[in-house]
Image: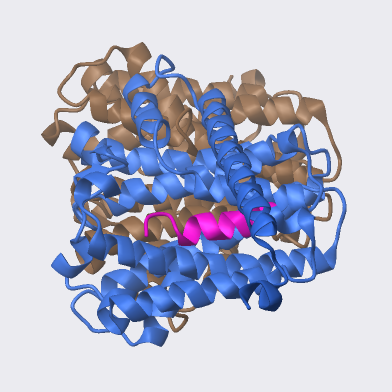
Chain colours: A brown, B blue
Amino acid sequence: MTELNSGLTDSNLKDLNLQNQAQKASFDAWVANHQARMENVLDAHMPSAETLPTTLHEAMRYSVLGGGKRVRALLAYAAGEFCGAELTTIDLPAASVELIHAFSLVHDDMPCMDDDALRRGKLSTHKKYGDAIALLVGDALQSLAFQLISQNKSLENATQKLQMLHLLALASGSRGMAGGQAIDLESIGIPLTREELEQMHIHKTGALIRAAALLGAYSSAKEDEDKLKAIDHFAKAIGLVFQVVDDILDAEADTQTLGKTAGKDAQNNKSTYVTILGLSAAKQLASELHANAMAALSYYGREADLLRQLATFITHRSF
Amino acid sequence: MTELNSGLTDSNLKDLNLQNQAQKASFDAWVANHQARMENVLDAHMPSAETLPTTLHEAMRYSVLGGGKRVRALLAYAAGEFCGAELTTIDLPAASVELIHAFSLVHDDMPCMDDDALRRGKLSTHKKYGDAIALLVGDALQSLAFQLISQNKSLENATQKLQMLHLLALASGSRGMAGGQAIDLESIGIPLTREELEQMHIHKTGALIRAAALLGAYSSAKEDEDKLKAIDHFAKAIGLVFQVVDDILDAEADTQTLGKTAGKDAQNNKSTYVTILGLSAAKQLASELHANAMAALSYYGREADLLRQLATFITHRSF
């Protein structure tokens, strides 16, 4: 009966399973490959630790290199490939988003913000280099992000680069990431509604994740409005699912697995998807958002598979 | 004898004096006019205090508006006019430099840096809004600076805008302003040589002052390599004289006149031009640097008068 219903024989099922395993292995290799690529790009485009002022440059490299899943860079690469951009053209825009992300983590970990001693499995920047250097590291990483886009020689079109710079500046600023952090600050100890929480995350993490995907797409010389719209829709869902999963991981994981201090949200009396919805409904929401991301790509065939796999990778990082 | 030597009669001298007074009055009006213009540009291009998140936007406006001599904007306007740029085209590049400057002051005043309670005659941002908001204010002002250049509609040429963004990113970053602040931090309590002090200031304040003048020049559609070189040379001298005068003012002025805490350098055991050279030799150095700035413009006639007057204005701000 099963065979009749699904139209699959045992042999078909086995083939499909092998095919899935092969796809999974191929995607895992793509992830590892592009993570390594991003590490090399960042390494090559940051001043060496021997460049004066040495402490600042050492601390910048410490804060950026040798850690992180590079989710934003992976999104930029996948969206760029989907739009037909060359990898070398995506390198610097993707790196710039990673630099903005790293700068936000350095400042966010400082005593006046989240006061976190651990990041990516090692001491946070201010714990290792002191608060003053951490402040300057964040400031200088932000400048470097804009510098990299402006000097991207593998992209000739100045208008495309300007469009990227504008989007990145908006996504980082007071109506993007910094604004989300301000809302977050003001909400400590105040229970948020689900809508307020969503607004906070759309700014705090969503804006930069959206920028990552769009910067990848803007790296292509071919303008395709439909693809841009699909990526925008996709990235908005991914930005939210990313945060829902983050909240679930913070509630569930231990510090060692997480690479940063676990249980901080509850400790800081912060509203999260888990505190508002409960663990089970938060997982359900993650699944729904994942489905939304997939739906945004429904018009496309195999060329969107990388984005689909990435959505699944982000949703199922650790549960 | 005096008449013969100088070729001037008493009547000539009186005329010259009146002419100087008229020039001075005209320059003072130009300064007041362009300071007010910059205030309006900044006001119009910063999110209102009613825009969410309101505390962050209120604090950003507090940190930028209603104070400051706008020396960097004046330099951008004067250099731009010298190169034939329209005022409206210079507005946003000049504003972006003022935003970068304001962001650096907000972060520099924080407890982990200079720990200063006063700025531009009022409470520093962290004293008024707390450290976390001050951190985010600086971050968001930096993003806004890059945003303003990228969206400057009065300048059509994308390549010119990219050139500005690149220069501003370099001037703000680890090999510009942030780098100078790092060198400054590391030198507290360690006596610097005059050369080391100069290197520190070339980065900490000089890079952004140079960027201000060059961004003004880049605002012109006419490319004139000789004028650009003259402005670069001029701005480098001005950047240093600015700092020498700052050191003299810190040593001489009282807190009320200065609008920020006076005598902080000596209190923090910092090397300054006054501690290294003494007050009299520091004043002599200021005069020499002023002469260097003038020499950079020697090839030009009346069209460089505004830059000359500005050099004198900066050198003689309060002594």
Q: Which residues are magenta?
A: B306-319
Image quarter hosting the N terminus of chain B: bottom right
Residue B317 horizontal/vertical position (percent)? 42, 54
Up-down: is A37 above or below A318? below
What type of secondary structure mainly makes up the magenta span? helix
Q: Is residue A202 left or right of residue A84?
A: left
- The image shows residue A247, relative to residue B5, as above or below, that is above
User: What residue is drawn where x is 24% and y is 23%?
Assistant: A187
Q: Quadrant of the C terminus of chain B?
A: bottom left
What residue is at 80 percent from the left and 27 percent from the top?
Answer: A225
Dividing the picture into quarters, in which one does residue B53 lie?
top left
Q: Is residue B186 above or below residue A204?
A: below
> Is residue A83 found left or right of A48 in the rendered image?
right
Q: What residue do we see at 19% from left, 45% from top?
A: B117
Q: Nearer the viewer, residue A257 or B266?
A: B266
- Residue nearest the viewer, comparing B241 with A93: B241
Q: Which quadrant holds residue B283?
A: bottom left
Depth check: give the residue in front, B223 or B113.
B223
Q: Is residue B23 visible from the viewing direction of this image?
A: yes
Spot occupied by residue A125 in the image (x, y as percentages of width and height): 28, 61
Q: Where does the image place residue B285, in percent across and percent down from the top left? A: 44, 78
Residue depicted at x 45% and y 26%: A202
**Extreme residue in the front direction:** B1
Q: Is residue B219 left or right of residue B223?
A: left
- Residue B165 visible in the displayed image: no
Q: Position of residue B271 (x, y in %)?
A: 27, 76
Residue B76 highlighted magenta (yes or no): no
